[in-house]
Amino acid sequence: MTQNILKIENLSLSYKDQEVLKNINLSLDLGERVSILGESGSGKSSLLRCIAGFENINKGKISLKNEIVSSETFMLPTEKRGVGMVVQEKALFPHLTVKKNILFGIESNSNKNEIVSELAELFKIEKLLDKLPGQISGGEQQRVAFARSLAPSPSLLMLDEPFSALDDKLKQELYYELDKIFEKQELSILLVTHDREEAQILTSRSLKLSQGSLSLIE
Amino acid sequence: MFTWKLLPFAVAIIFIAPIIIVFSSLFGTYSDTWNHLIEFVLVDYVSTSIFLVIGVSIGVLTIGVFTAYAVTNYNFFGKKFFEWALILPLAIPPYILAYTFTGLFDANGDANVFVRLLFNLENNFVLFPSVRNITGAIIVFSFTLYPYVYLVTRSAFLNQSSSIKESGRLLGLGQVGVFSKISLPLARPAFIAGLMLVIMETLSDFGAVDHFAVQTFTTGIFRTWYGLYDLNTAMQLSSLLLMIIFLFYFLERFSREGVNYTNDNSTFKTSKEINLKGVKSGLVSFFCFLPIFIGFILPIIELIIWALDARVTLFNEKFIMSSFNTITLGILTGVLCAFLAFVINFSIRYTKNNFLGKLSSFLSIGYAIPGLILAVGITRFLVFADRNIFSDLDFVITGSLVGLVLAYIIKSYALANSSIESGYERISNSIDNSARLLGARGSILLGKVHFPLMKTSFLTAILLVTSEVVKELPATLILRPFNFDTLAVVTYTYAAEERMYQAAMPSLAIVLIGIVPLIFLSKMIRSSRLAET
C-alpha cells in the first residue's frame, strides 16, 4: 500500500474579506508528482504557504504523513513539518557559503558531510561549495537552492515557480536533470507554475487553480 | 571649468589644515608633562575609555538591535508609535542627560526624595545609587546614542526578504533561531556601522564625562591644556585619540560597504508581521518604552520641573542673549555649510570628475573629529594665520567667531552634504544637458537651474546643521570669543556650578531645536513603512 504524504480536505483561506482558496481537496502519495497550474493571483502560492505552515487556514485541514498539521484550531510550526520548498527568488542565505547553505538544515546529522558531497555531485555544484551566493550565477543559485531543500530529506518538496527567473536554455537543462533526480530519489513533488510544458515534463498529474478553486486538467 | 575643479581642493586644504596641525605635534618635542601623564593618568585615560566603549557598545547593541527587530517583525501594542518615537533620544545631547541624571539620582536627587516621601523613609535613605561614575556614563551614552544602531539596524531588518527567513523555518529553525542565525548575521554590517558611530561619539564626548568626573581621553586633553597649560602635549594626546577615532571611522565605512549583501531587489518579499497578544505584547511594548522613557521623557520631565521650580527669571538677559547667539550661529553655519556642499556637489557634477567626488566624501570625515580636538587644531591654525598672514593686525582672527564657525562647518559638513547629495540624485542629467544646449553654463546653470530645484534640500541641510551646532559643546567652549555665550555653554556653566534650575531653560531650548530634524527623520521612517505596504 502506498503511503499518503499530503492530504488537504475542504481547505479555505481568506485574507481580510477576500477568499483566496475555496474548499480545496488534494491528495498526494509517496513518489507522486503533481503540478498546479494557474494565473498570477489565483492562489497557487498561498496553497503552498498553507502547507508549509506560513498561513493560518480558515476552514478544513491539512495532513502530512497522516498527521494533521493545520486545522481551524491547530497549527504545527513550520520547522516541525518536515517539508521542503524551492521558490523563484531562491532565498539563499547571502552571508553563508554554498556549502554552509546546504548544511544549514542538517547541522545535527552525523552524515552531513556525505550528504553535502552527494548533493553537490548530483546538482553539479562541487566547485561552488566555498563561494557565496552572490558570487555565482542565477542558474547555479537555483541548483544550490534545490540541493539545500533536499538535504534534510523532506517528505514533500514544494516548488513555487522555481524556474521563472531563468532563461529558456537553462530551464530545459534543469528540467531534465531534476526529472532524473526526482525519479531516482522517489520524491513527492508539488509544483506550482503557469508553464504547461514545465508541468508536463516534471509531473504526472496536473490540476488547475482558478479563482481559488481546484479542478483536474484533462 | 578650472575654477570649479579648484574649489573642492581649496576647501579640502582648509578642512585638513587643523587635523594636520594636530598630527604634526607628534613630530615635535615632548615636554615633561608626559612624565606626569604616564606616571599618574594615562593608564586611567586609556582603561576608562576602553571600559566605557565596551559598556556603551553592549548597551546600544542590546537596546538598538532588539527594539529594531521588535518593530520590524512583530505587531504589538503601540508599535506604530515606537517605530518613530525610538529615535527621540537623539534630541538629547549626552551632557544634558548626564545633568538630569545627577539631579535625579544624587543622594538628595528628585528620585531619592520622591521614594523617601512615598514610603515615609528617613532623610538619609538612598535607594538609587550615585551615577557620577563610569556606570552612570555608560547608561547615559547607551540611552542617548542607541538610536544610531536602531536606525541602521531597522533599515537592514526591513530589507530582509521574508523568503529568506521562511527558508530558515523550512530548514528547521524556530523564531529565535531565525533571529540569531539569519536576521542578526545578515544585519551585522549595518549594526556594526551604527556601533562605530556610537563609539566615535562616545570617545568624542566631553560634557557628560566631565560632569561625571570620568577620566577619559577628552577630559585628559582638556585638563592638559587648561589645567597644565600645555597645548603641545594636549595636541599630542589629541593625535592619539584621533588615530583611534579614524580607525573606527574607516571600520564604519568598511561595514557600510557590506550592507548591500542582503537581497536582490527584484525578488524582494515583505515580511509578514507576527501578531503578539497579552503578556508578550505588553512585555515587548515595555521594552520599547523603556529607552524612550529613560532617554527622552524622564530628562524632559526633570528639566520642566526644574524650569518651573526655578526661583529666577527664566527669560533673563543671559538666556535671551545666548539663544540669540546660538540661533544666529546655527543659521549662519547652516547657510555656509549648505552653500559649500551645494557648490562642491555642483563642481563634481559639472566637471564629471570622480576624484572630486571622492574628495567630497573625504571632507565628510569632519563629523568624526571630536569638537575638542578640532578646537585644539583650529586654535593653532588661527595663531599661525595671525602671525604669518595678518601680522600687521593684532591677533585679529584668533579668539574671533571665525574659528568657531570654521569648527562648526568642518564638523557639520557631512550633514549638509548628505542632504545636498540626495537632492542632486533627484535631478536628471537630461536637465543639465537641455540647459547647456540652451547656453546655460557654470554659475548660470548653478543659480538659475539647479538652485530652484534644490531649495528643499538646501533648507533641510540648513536645519540639520543648525540643530547640530546648537548641541556642540567643547568646540564652542574653547573657541568662543570672550564673553560670548551660547545655550550649550550656558548649560555647561550652570551645571558645572550645580545650578541645575538655571540650566533647565537653556537645556530645554537645545532639546527643542534638536527635535526639528527628528521630525523629518520620523516622517522618513513612516514613509519607508508606507512604501512597503
Image (cartoon, coloured by chain):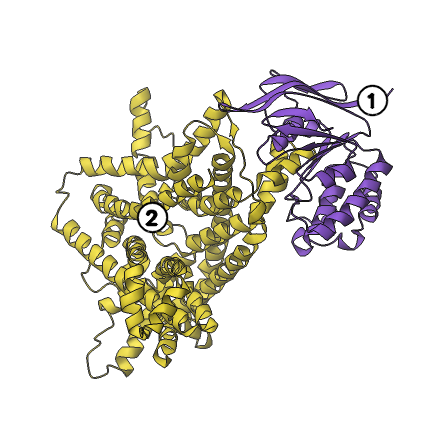
Chain colours: A purple, B yellow
Marks 1 and 2, Cα distance to the nearest angstrom? 70 Å
Give residue B301's quadrant in the image: top left
SS for dot 2: helix
Q: Which quarter of the image is occupied by the N terminus of chain B?
A: bottom left
SS for dot 1: loop
For label 2, the crowd category at 10 Å Cα-Cα, with few meaning under 14, some 14 to 19 and many 20 or more, is: many
Give residue B474's quadrant in the image: bottom left
* Image position of B150 (left or right of B231): right
Q: Amino acid at mark 2?
A: Tyr
- The vertical placement of A57 against B12, above or below, is above
Q: Residue at x 25, y 69 (%)?
A: B402
Tag 1 and tag 2 share a subunit: no
Residue B192, which numbered label? Answer: none
Chain letter of the residue beneath label 2 in the structure image: B
Q: Amino acid at mark 1?
A: Gln
Q: Residue furthest front?
A: A218
Residue B95, which numbered label? Answer: 2
Is disc 1 in contact with disc 2, using a CB cutoff of under 8 Å?
no
Q: Residue at x 62, y 33 (%)?
A: A45
- The vertical placement of B231 against B312, above or below, is below
Choose mark 1 or mark 2, whichever is in front. 1
Q: Position of residue A6 (x, y in %)?
A: 74, 24
